[in-house]
Image: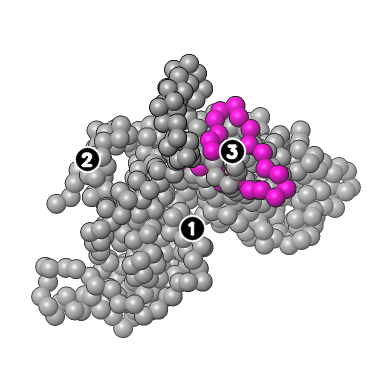
């Protein structure tokens, strides 16, 4: 069940309430981890490091927040910068290649799940090959369902830039995976 | 209906991000244009594929790892503040002395930053100076929002550290800053401008004449002085000059001739020399160098602004409503509208 994060949770985190921070962590951990996992082409170790890094930064500086409305923007900016920074640091160690990813989903039949898993693995592979800023824009849109305005705020760019990046990403996906559609 | 093709609006159309009027015009165009209909089908296929992404569960151990990391990161500062040997030998006396200091002198209770790399300087407090010699470097934790590496032969002063502002002065030398704070919380003052963090990583060097050189490697930095602001994005440099403030930012991959001519313009070249250097800048400018051209507009005279307008309009056509006369007259709304177009290049 999705946890509800409201002003009082953020304020409790700012007062150092560890239960509130746990709530915040539970609410966002899978999203942060999923973005990092896809950004680094399924590398679970890096995704886990990035997730920890983001929450350590969050934990140590959440007291600086003045109001609730900036929170998700700041969180996704943290995720974006941490991914981009980590990519720069470990650029030579990354392999954009053949890793298979387990996609948990208990709603579908075995066959449907297999097809879905294959399709999703292909999509992730194409996304992993996109330029980093294109990649993070797609991930914020499709993992977080953020509006263009929210993505623009998180990435520090304009809505027009978000629109053109998503256009480009959609074209790349459609062309590289034309056999899937 | 849009008279030109509408492919660039198609993802926004698919995601319901267009205004009712824009949506109506896109739909009108799609009815008439087979090419855009094909493009729309492609965007929809791409969006459907992207929609197949699903969340992965973070490993169960992540929370415990996080607690360990937090606990580990909080221990070293305590160890540095009270050396183990001293604590072991003089425990009772130390407690009395420390309690005494805490009671008598609020200075020791003021917020401080952890310093590593310099013997004898474990914490840095507001009003204190940190100085490295030719063979030393230091790492400083900027409260809980980032860190800086202080290079050799560098002097910094901590001016303010509180929840809504962290400000240092870089008197000389070079530092590398990396922050994860909300924008505008961390500021580095130099003799010629203030570098305001907008969520980023950068190096800043103060030269002997009081000028400085900023190089942004991630995110954005604003250089400010007396109400004048220069935005420096990742991959760009900006020089500042004592008494003159921020210069014109430029991308690191712009041509040498472009950078050299820009430097001459920033240094206040006048008359025929200014015209000659401006010609070089305009001739060498690529689309990406619109960053520099836009920032040059308010810095030169009306005649030069007219020339910049012509070149900038070739590289990146201005949005509707932005006119040559308005730009030459430095109309704030028109400058801002064009900046939004230009800024897409580096975002």
Q: Which residue is mark 2?
A: A19
Give the farthest residue toward the front: B89
Q: Secondary structure at mark 1?
A: helix
Q: Is residue B86 visible?
A: yes
At x 30% / y 32%, what residue is drawn? A15
Across and down, in percent, residue A91 comes to 50, 68
At x 36% / y 50%, what residue is drawn? B69
Q: Secondary structure at mark 2?
A: helix
Across and down, in percent, residue B118 comes to 60, 43
The chain letter under disc 1 is A
Q: Which residue is mark 1?
A: A85
Residues B136 and A104: in front is: B136
Residues A14 and A160: in front is: A14
Give the total of numbered labels: 3
In primary-sequence order, the first of circles 2 and 1 is 2
The chain letter under disc 2 is A
Q: Which mark is residue A143?
A: none
Give the farthest residue toward the top: B104
Q: Is residue B246 visible?
A: no
Q: Which mark is residue B120?
A: 3
Q: Which residues are magenta?
A: B121-145
């Amino acid at each position: 069940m999705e946890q509800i994060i409201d002003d009082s949770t953020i304020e409790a985190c700012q007062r150092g309430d560890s239960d509130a921070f746990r709530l915040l962590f539970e609410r966002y951990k899978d999203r942060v981890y999923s973005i990092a996992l896809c950004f680094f082409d399924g590398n679970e170790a890096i995704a886990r490091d990035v997730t920890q890094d983001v929450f350590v930064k969050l934990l140590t500086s959440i007291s600086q927040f003045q109001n609730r409305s900036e929170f998700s923007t700041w969180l996704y900016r943290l995720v974006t910068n941490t991914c981009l920074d980590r990519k720069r640091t470990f650029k030579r160690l990354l392999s954009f290649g053949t890793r298979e990813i387990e996609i948990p989903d208990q709603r579908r039949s075995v066959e449907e799940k297999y097809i879905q898993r294959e399709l999703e693995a292909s999509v992730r592979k194409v996304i992993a090959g996109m330029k980093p800023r294109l990649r993070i824009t797609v991930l914020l849109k499709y993992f977080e369902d953020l509006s263009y305005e929210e993505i623009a705020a998180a990435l520090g760019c304009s809505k027009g830039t978000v629109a053109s990046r998503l256009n480009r990403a959609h074209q790349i996906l459609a062309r590289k995976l034309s056999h899937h559609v | 209906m849009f008279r030109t093709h509408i492919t660039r609006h198609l993802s926004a159309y698919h995601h319901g991000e267009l205004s009712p009027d824009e949506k109506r015009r896109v739909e009108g165009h799609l009815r008439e244009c087979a090419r855009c209909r094909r493009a729309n089908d492609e965007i929809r296929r791409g969006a459907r594929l992207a929609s197949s992404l699903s969340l992965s569960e973070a490993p169960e151990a992540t929370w415990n790892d996080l607690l360990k990391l937090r606990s580990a990161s909080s221990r070293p500062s305590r160890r540095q503040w009270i050396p183990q040997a001293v604590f072991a030998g003089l425990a009772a006396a130390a407690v009395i002395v420390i309690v005494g200091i805490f009671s008598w002198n609020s200075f020791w209770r003021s917020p401080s930053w952890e310093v590593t790399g310099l013997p004898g300087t474990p914490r840095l407090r507001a009003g204190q100076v940190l100085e490295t010699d030719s063979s030393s470097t230091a790492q400083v934790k900027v409260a809980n929002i980032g860190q800086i590496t202080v290079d050799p032969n560098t002097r910094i002063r901590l001016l303010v550290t509180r929840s809504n502002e962290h400000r240092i002065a870089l008197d000389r030398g070079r530092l590398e800053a990396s922050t994860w704070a909300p924008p505008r919380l961390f500021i580095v003052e130099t003799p010629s401008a203030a570098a305001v963090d907008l969520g980023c990583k950068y190096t800043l060097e103060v030269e002997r004449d009081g000028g400085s050189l900023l190089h942004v490697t991630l995110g954005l930095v604003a250089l400010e002085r007396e109400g004048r602001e220069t935005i420096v994005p990742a991959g760009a440099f900006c020089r500042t000059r004592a008494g003159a403030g921020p210069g014109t930012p430029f991308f690191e991959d712009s041509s040498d001739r472009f950078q050299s001519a820009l430097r001459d313009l920033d240094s206040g070249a006048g008359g025929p020399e200014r015209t000659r250097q401006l010609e070089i800048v305009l001739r060498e400018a690529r689309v990406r160098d619109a960053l520099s051209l836009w920032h040059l507009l308010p810095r030169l005279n009306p005649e030069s602004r007219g020339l910049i307008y012509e070149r900038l309009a070739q590289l990146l056509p201005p949005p509707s409503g932005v006119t040559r006369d308005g730009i030459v007259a430095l109309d704030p709304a028109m400058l801002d509208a064009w900046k939004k177009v230009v800024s897409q290049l580096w975002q």
